[in-house]
Amino acid sequence: RTTPDELKALVARASASGLQVAAHAIGDGAIEAMCDAVEAAGATHLRHRVEHCTICPPDLQARLARLGMVAVMQPMAARFGRVAS
């Protein structure tokens, strides 16, 4: 498991190199940690991604959008009622 500080360091290094990060994050805590890392890196010019993004309440969806991040949703999870907002 990657700690929030490790994630911030990874995103900062990748962003400084012009690389976009794709992170697997299902719950709101993990998604928020990724948003925190992107925000700390000041990397809003890159299209960092959150894969799965299953439990993502409206305020967190808005934050993803503000940061220019991409939520890669899983349509089959939505079909079977596994996406919570």
Image (cartoon, grey):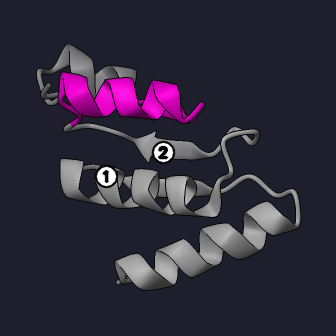
Residue 81 position, x and y percent, is 11, 21
Q: What amino acid type is highlighted by mark number 1?
A: Glu
Helix, strand or loop at label 1? It is helix
Highlighted magenta segment, given as a residue range: 56-74
Which of the 4 image quadrants contains residue 70?
top right
Q: Is residue 9 left or right of residue 76?
A: right
Q: Is residue 80 above or below residue 39?
A: above
Residue holding disc 2: 50
The mark that comes first in sequence, 1 or 2, is 1
Q: Dot 2, crowdedness within 10 Å: few (<14), some or many (≥20)?
A: many
Q: CA distance from mark 1 to mark 2?
A: 10 Å
Other residues around mark 1 within 10 Å, as few (<14) / some (14–19) / many (≥20): some
Q: Amino acid at mark 2?
A: Val
Which of the labelled discs sits on residue 32, or is there none? 1
**Rendered position, 30 above or below 59:** below
Residue 44 inside the magenta-drawn segment: no
Name the residue nearer the viewer: 42 or 56: 42
Residue 63 colored in magenta in the image? yes
Q: Residue at x 48, y 84 (%)?
A: 6
Q: Are marks 1 and 2 in contact (CB under 8 Å)?
A: no
Image-based side of 57 in relation to 50, left or right: left
At a point 52% along the width and 53% down the height, the residue shown is: 39
Q: Would residue 18 appear left or right of 46 to someone viewing this image? A: right
